[in-house]
Image (cartoon, rainbow, N blue to C red):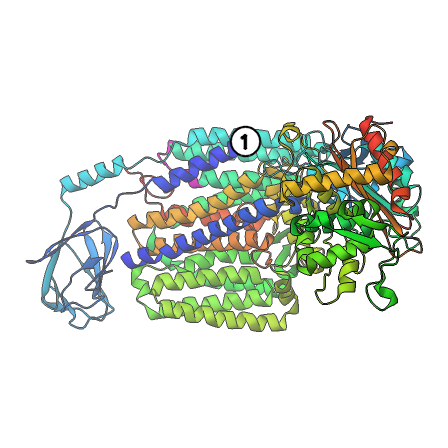
Amino acid sequence: MLAAYILLIAIVSLLTTRATPEIWGYYMVEGGGNFPITHWENVIGRSRSADINIPLNIVSNNHALLIRRDEDKWMIKDLGSKNGTKVNGFDLDPQKRYIIGPGDQIDMGGVIATITPPSIEETRNNRFMRRLDKEPVHPWKILLAITVFQILTIVQLVIGMGEEMTASALLSIVLLCAVMWAYVMFFHATGRRGFEMEMIAFFLSTINLAVTASSDPGIVLKEFIAILLGLALLIFMCIFMQDLNRTRRIKPVLIGLSIVALLINLIFGTAKYGATNWIRVGAITVQPSELVKLAFILIGAGALEELYDRKNTVVYALFSLFCLGCLAMMSDFGTALIFFATYLVVSFLRSGDISRFALTAVAAGAMGLIVLRFKPYIASRFDAWGHVWEPEFMDDLGYQQTRTMSFGAGGGMLGLGAGNGSLKYVGASNTDLVFGFVMEEWGFIIAVLLVLCIATLSVFAVMHIVAGRSTFYTILACSAATMFLVQTMLNVFGAIDLFPLTGVTFPFVSTGGTSLMTSWAMLAYFKAADMRRNAGLGAGREE
Amino acid sequence: MRKQEKRAVICLIMALMLVAGLGIFGYRLVKHGGEWATFYGNTQIYTDGAINRGTVTDRNGVELLSCTPEGFDYTDDYELRVATVHAVGDPLGNVSTGAITVFRSQLIGYDLLNGTYDASANGKKIALTIDANANRAAYEALAGRTGTVGVYNWKTGEIVCMVSTPGFDPAYEEETVDDGEPIYFNNFLSGLITPGSTFKLVTSAAVIDKMDNRDSFTYDCDGINQIGDTKESRLIDVSAHGEVDFREALAQSCNGAFGALTREVGAKAMKEYTEKAGLTKPIDVDGIETAAGVFDFPDNDDIRLSWAGIGQAGDMVNPCAMMVYMGAIANGGEAVQPTLIKSATFLKDITGGKSLGRYLDQDTAGELRSMMKNNVVENYGEGNFPGLDIYAKSGTAEGESYQPDAWFVGFTDSEESPYAFVVWVKGGGYGAQAAAPIANRVLQTLGSGGE
């Protein structure tokens, strides 16, 4: 019940708050009208979906880009329009950037306009409006609820497991609680608001520790350290991504690092459950493909300007192909599918081209069939798909799924209690089958809420990009959401036989250090898109 | 930017897919959760493949079986174990009609809210409707012969006695020697047996409804009753009954007369009344389906039709279905669904069990009842059933054995004991002699509330 309360507050808060767009200036057309500029990146054109829509035939569909640079500096770039663009009578070279300011005369085939900054009064009004926005909920109540939940978890684990429970496992949960308070108190003190996403992540992480404690108490501390690292990475990334240009410049470096990481994995990787996606460094095992996920999202994102740059798109496509190839060679088809789905969504966001979207999907489907032909062990999973309860598969290829459903159903709506489950004796129960694990020990209601949390994060991302500043952040949030969603679908639906079992992790909840850390770091992409007042970690405070 | 914002809807679509998938699973969970949770792979409730919690008792709370993590703990009474094995079930799950198998999810105590969570870890207690003493009495009375005894309350539908032999001792199942006898088979629920003369109660129903001139019907029985040229076309009787009317024909169980009556009402009516009597369809007994009877009434073969009308030829009846038909006659034509689990409420005692619909018109049932009483008075002797208001029909069927199979079916009618019963003894010989005493002994046990 407590868990339901926590999650519902956070979910409702994320879904009901909404940011008012800010107005950065006006695009005043002579004798035409006054267009407010609500984004940092704008397309000027005749197309109805253009941000500044000038419905005159003389203007091309996507005529030019207008991008905010500074308080009163704007960058303009002609997109190869038919009638060209002039600034103060000077013909602009297409595809070249020019800096302009308020008062400069922009001429698009005879449509003359100037940019004017918003008046001081307007700016003040705007600030006022934003202050009227519904404040994100105060974190204290939820924090307290999660803390109580954590205490109850510890009590249940001690009752359920008795002697088998280790001190370090319980200590990890206590430490997680301390870190949670420290994190929120620190950022609250520095004026930040809106911690729902972190609250959700802390809650999911608590379940992660409980699941791990129940199945393998010895490695709970490791999981906790992964959370810490993930949190640190999250804070670092939020601050780093504050500067859009800096973030864009890091892309080539990330491409290089990702390639190296995947190659190392291919050469030195060790196999686990059929997929060779692990490398061992001393006592630690790392899953490089998880880390590459982070880079993959960043590399796919682009500012509006880059989206009109063919070279940028080609580089992304080639990089995606490389990643997919490596993952296929590692036999990690679940992760490959996640990458591919993310690639599809990102290229759709970039180009909006549905036919290409469909074509790529069909081509991939054909490739998939070829893979099935040559990898019989993958094909055999498809045989069992949808038939796991048939005697032929029940104790064989459908073993994990039937156990997931059987033990999961045994948990009912309310669960048997942390530490009391038996699914833990089935292989990969705390990773691939974690949905059933949670169903058995925590009940169906909480298991559903976990999935709804992931769904909420993505819905939130979509709702808040309306006030986004750059397509860069929009794409970041959407592809992070896609990754979470696809991963959750593959994990949950695979375990309950709606999809073939592919063996991917449930974000935050599945046991596994690298995956957990990546999930946390991935939050940075949502935080970067959070345009509510003072919600971002990196942004300076607004008075 | 606006374009990208619009395209972001794709994320919403995926989120919807995720929620929709969860919805599908939720639906499946509600529908199949019980099956899933009670699947033998669930080690919470199975130890070495055997269910480890739950208790089965008889209707009076006599413990028949308790399931523990150490194994199955049956009652100490050997005779009771064997007498109830087909109702309770066996450790290896060979008996498909056993409570362990059929009522598994109730035993485990699964429900959607709590799953298999069980604070006491002892599982639930299921009270069967059977009476341990009645079962023991029936088992003793069958005295080692193959057969079955079924008794149920035709008002509430509760099966108070269900014994099938040969049985076996479930506590020592591993040591049971399989000598080819179908020991795991429940004759009462799953058997299909030649009904013999008991089927004349179905033919009689058709005669009552279809022959308005039945009161003037007479037949002169010479004991051989040749109706064709061949040896097979004789409807031989034990003795020559002489001239009998309809009522007398049933009391004497005259094959010759019933052959003539069958030909009179015709194949179509015979088929209709067999179906109306519920003998051709399976009956649902708390999830166990009884076997469906098989009958054939050819309209172009008088000899075969005559044999079918007296319960021979290819006729096959399920004992439970026959018992329910007896209940329908007792209950004024309306049949009540039999049940094996005692319901916790007293409501059933007042409102009666679930109806299976009307098998017979009230008047038809009334006439049959009177004729069945006449059978007892004229033929079986009321003195053989002291203290019982009993209505019955015997049967002597040419079955697989050298000796004919003995049947005794019918009902009693009193406020405390409204019981319909069926007794079948394979190779038992003459029906009234072999099977009637068994029925009497069980009914006496039930009436006295135990021996």
Q: Main secondary structure of the magenta part?
A: loop
Direction left: furthest residue? A31
Q: Is residue B142 above or below residue B444?
A: below
Identify the residue at image location x=61%, y=47%.
Answer: B32
Identify the residue at image location x=89%, y=33%.
Answer: B77
The secondary structure type at the circle numbered 1 is: helix
Identify the residue at image location x=61%, y=35%.
Answer: B114
Q: Nearer the viewer, residue B374 or B123?
A: B374
Q: Quadrant of the C terminus of chain B?
A: top right
Q: Nearer the viewer, residue B223 or A165?
A: B223
Magenta span: A189-197
Q: Nearer the viewer, residue B272 or A407?
A: B272
Left or right, B15 with respect to B125, comes to: left
Q: Position of residue A313 (x, y in %)?
A: 38, 67
Q: Which residue is mark 1?
A: A149
Q: Position of residue A82 (x, y in %)?
A: 18, 73
Q: Is residue A466 above or below residue A331?
A: above
**Mark 1 Cα-neighbour bin, 10 Å: few <14, some 14–19, many ≥20:** some
Q: Position of residue A516 (x, y in %)?
A: 54, 47
In terms of image quadrants, where is residue A249? bottom left
Left or right, A52 with respect to B223, comes to: left
Q: Position of residue A465 (x, y in %)?
A: 33, 50
Q: Quadrant of the N terminus of chain B?
A: bottom left
Whether residue B95 is visible here, answered yes or no, is no
Q: Number of marks in the image?
A: 1
> What chain does badge 1 belong to?
A
The kind of residue on which mark 1 rests is Phe
B329 in the magenta segment: no
